[in-house]
Image (spheres, rainbow, N blue to C red):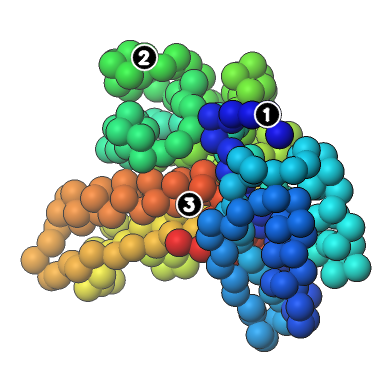
């Protein structure tokens, strides 16, 4: 290891069939390579028989290099049928924000990033409208407008993908981006996409959840942050929250109240992802908060 790294920590995420000795085996491997474990959290899904663990550790006094450490982890992972990934703290993820006309989620993410609550780089904002260009300018972030029309969707998605490649984006966040990304887009991007849906899924999926909630007279409204998949509003859920509503609230009241929940739910999901606290298993997640 270099003598001084800006951030000498790393995070190991694993999942595998549950059996005895997994925790001890991983701890022994890390200890044997000079790592100091700072945090360790684990979960066993007993119905599925699957073990999950997140280990956050310090490599400042490591006696080996990263390639050797990864080789040692791979050696123990294979017989355990373990899926694993390791993320090093000295590399910041590069995040692109997609937004349409409303800016409450956009502002919240940018302010949290500015305050140091979201440890990442935000080099790009993409929109299908020019409305939020002044916000991007305020924060000094390039703003690219890619209008979306049914007749030219494939061409415009290709432009968006080119931007994500140009800016070397690791994560896309849909901050109330009111367009559906095609399955082809998600396949070609092949990196995580986090969406905020303005409903407590699976209730009221689709484009007008507050109107549906009003018609049903619900007493709770909420928001759901999830990974985007080919199945609209059905991707693995990362974070959810709710707030009380009553018969006195109009649709406009529900929208106003819902915005508070949307921005806090989205930022919590993004932070958990950036801190490598999320493991996806099937269409569910394990979130080590």
Which comes before the other along the chain, label 3 or label 1?
Answer: 1
Against 96, residue 266 (above or below) is below
Q: Considering depth in this image, is 11 or 272 the residue closer to the camera?
A: 11
Query: Is residue 241 at least partly visible in the picture?
Result: yes
Residues at circles 1 and 2 in contact by the CB criterion of under 8 Å = no
Residue 110's image quarter?
A: top left
Residues 111 and 230: in front is 111
Q: In the image, which disc is placed on residue 2? A: 1
The residue carrying mark 2 is 140
Instruction: Tell us which disc is closer to us: 1 or 2.
Output: 1
Q: Is residue 72 above or below residue 104?
A: below
* Horizontal relation, residue 179 to residue 5: left or right: left
Q: CA distance from mark 2 to mark 3?
A: 25 Å
Q: Secondary structure at mark 3?
A: helix
Tell me where residue 161 appears, x and y as whole percent.
65, 25
Q: Is residue 266 left or right of residue 44?
A: left
Between the C-alphas of marks 3 and 1, the distance is 28 Å
Task: Count residues near mark 3 (Cα–Cα under 10 Å), then give few for <14, some for 14-19, many for 20+.
Answer: some
Query: Which mark sits nearer the N-terminus, 1 or 2?
Result: 1
Q: Using residue 165 as the reference point, say whether residue 101 is left or right of it.
A: left
- Give the Cα distance between marks 1 and 2: 33 Å
């Amino acid at each position: 290891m270099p003598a001084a790294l800006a951030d000498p920590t790393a995070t190991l995420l694993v999942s595998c069939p549950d059996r005895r000795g997994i925790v001890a085996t991983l701890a022994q491997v890390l200890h044997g390579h000079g790592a100091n474990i700072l945090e360790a959290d684990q979960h066993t899904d007993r119905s599925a028989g699957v073990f999950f663990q997140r280990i956050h550790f310090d490599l400042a006094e490591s006696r080996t290099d990263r390639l050797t450490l990864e080789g040692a982890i791979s050696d123990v992972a294979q017989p355990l049928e373990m899926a694993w990934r390791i993320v090093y703290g000295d590399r910041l993820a590069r995040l692109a924000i997609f937004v349409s006309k409303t800016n409450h989620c956009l502002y919240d993410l940018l302010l949290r990033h500015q305050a140091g609550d979201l440890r990442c780089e935000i080099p790009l904002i993409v929109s299908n409208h020019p409305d939020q260009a002044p916000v991007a300018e305020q924060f000094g972030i390039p703003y690219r407008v890619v209008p979306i029309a049914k007749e030219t969707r494939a061409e415009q998605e290709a432009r968006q993908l080119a931007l994500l490649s140009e800016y070397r984006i690791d994560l896309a966040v849909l901050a109330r981006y009111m367009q559906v990304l095609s399955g082809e887009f998600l396949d070609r991007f092949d990196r995580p996409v986090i969406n905020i849906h303005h409903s407590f899924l699976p209730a009221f999926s689709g484009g007008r959840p507050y109107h549906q909630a009003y018609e049903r007279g619900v007493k709770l409204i909420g928001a759901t942050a999830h990974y985007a998949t080919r199945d609209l509003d059905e991707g693995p859920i990362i974070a959810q929250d709710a707030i009380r509503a009553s018969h006195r609230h109009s649709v406009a009241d529900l929208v106003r109240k819902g915005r508070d929940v949307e921005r806090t739910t989205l930022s919590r999901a993004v932070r958990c992802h950036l801190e490598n606290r999320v493991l996806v298993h099937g269409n569910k997640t394990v979130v080590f908060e």
